Structures are given as structure tokens and as C-alpha cells.
Amino acid sequence: MITTDSVNGAPNWLDLATPDLDASTAFYGGVFGWEFRPGGAETGGYGMFTLDGRKVAGAMTVTADQGAPGWTVYFRSADADAAVKAAEQAGATVYLRPMDVLDQGRMAILADPAGAAFGIWQPRRHKGFEHVTQDGGLNWVELHTTDAGAAKEFYNAVLDWDTFDVPFPGGTYTTVNPAGTDENAMFGGIAPLGTEPGEAELGPHWTPYIHVPDVDAAAAAARKLGGTVRSAPESMAGVGRFATLTDPHGAVFAVIKGDPNQT
């Protein structure tokens, strides 16, 4: 599962690119109860979403020519430059080459060979999440891709993952976890593109799942605040109840309430 231990290869940060930071902070505050702490001039307007004072995600303003609104999942690496080099050799596109972010860490933004964007975060002062898994925190990340086998090979080469294939309605679902751990450490999955309604039109992409106490209430709140429900709340035994949503600017994310009987 996702932890705050900052394990190599696992998700250790999440941030939002939005054209309207004030509107987005109001939206996510209404859905998750997050508060926003703006950064100083030295951060270029980048700030932090917090829950009970603990960092859960970041956010920044982007213009139309800088990119589309959306969430970026970052994975921890002890050496961002080496990770990017391995990614390029494995067929990745590099959008932002490794760069220092003040004294907080070193980052890069890439897309895997199928086109799914993701980030690399090499922590220094900023280790990453201070709250995960429980209500209001990142609980799961999911890659929707056209070739699960190729994705496994790519991310194993770049982030040193272990994977497990499990039966899934209509096919196979692949869970992922840091190398050298077992299925109890899984933090995400790989699904064939198009498994979820409306996902195919997005192309290959990563979706972050935020844990909530009530999926239906979160979906209703998102709709009331100007978001949309891409896939209606549904339940799956051993997993929980979940829904895929879009904020008012088009950034896609999901909400989940874990099944208390899951193993």
C-alpha cells in the first residue's frame, strides 16, 4: 500500500496543474476537506494541499500553452538523473529534464512509451506525502494503457517494480509493488485502456485514487461544485466502492472507499 516511508519506486507525491488555482482549491476543499497553503514567490506560485496540517498534494497554475489541466503522479527515485536515462533508453519521452527544486528535491516529468505522463521525485527536504491511504489521502494509483506487458517491462526498467497478475472481469489486472516486497506492499495497478467507461478517450494515463468515507457523497459533492462523474459509483468485492470524477477544469481523479474485508 502507499505509505509515507518514501520507498524507491513507490508513489511519493501528487500534484495538480490548473488554470484557476483559487477555483481548484475551493473545489478540492469542498470534496476532500483539503486546505491550501500557497508558496512564496520563490516557488512560482506552487503550493500545498494539506489535511489536518499534513501535506497530501501540490498544486500550481498553468496556462493553456503550458499544458492541459491534470494530476501528475510522482514516483520516488534515489537518483532522478539515472531514472530518466533508463526511461529514455526504454523509449520514454522526457517533457522536463531533471532539475532541482530549491533545496526540496530533484524532479523530472516524462511519458512512458504508450504516452502516459508521470513524474520522478528525488527527495531532499521535501520527502513527499505526510498523509496517505486513509480518508483524504492518496490510496491507489492506476495506469490505463494499451499494452500492459510493455508497461510492466518499462516501469520495471525505470523504477524496479515487481508485478502480480490477478483475474479481472474481462481480462487480467496487474498489481504493482516495490521490488523485493510482496503483494501486501502493492500501491497500484495496470489496467487495459477502455476497461472503465470513458477512459479510452483519454488515451494512456495514470489515475490517482483518493480515499473517502463515502464514495456516493464525494461524487455528489464533486457534481455540485462543478465537476463531473465519469464513471458512477460501483462496488467490487475485496476492493471496495469507487468512482471516477473530473474537476471543473477537466482534471481526472478517482475516489475509493476500501472494502473492510479485503485481503
Image (cartoon, rainbow, N blue to C red):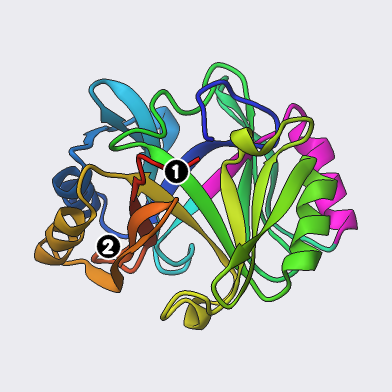
> Between 110 and 34, which is closer to the camera in this rendering?
34
The answer to whether residue 110 is left or right of residue 193 is right
Q: Residue beneath label 2, please?
A: 247
Q: Secondary structure at mark 1?
A: loop
State yes or no: residue 184 in magenta: no
156 in relation to 105, above or below: below
Q: Amino acid at mark 1?
A: Gln
Q: Which mark is residue 42?
A: none
Q: Amino acid at mark 2?
A: Asp
The answer to whether residue 104 is left or right of residue 31 is right
> Between 106 and 191, which is closer to the camera in this rendering?
191
Q: Secondary structure at mark 2?
A: loop
Q: Residue at x 36, y 45 (%)?
A: 258
Residue 61: image location, x then y, percent: 35, 51
Residue 15 seen in the figure: yes
181 in relation to 159, above or below: above
Residue 41: image location, x then y, percent: 36, 31
The answer to whether residue 239 is left or right of residue 117 is left
Region of the chain picked out in magenta, as a range: 73-90
Q: Which mark is residue 262?
A: 1
The answer to whether residue 82 is left or right of residue 151 is right
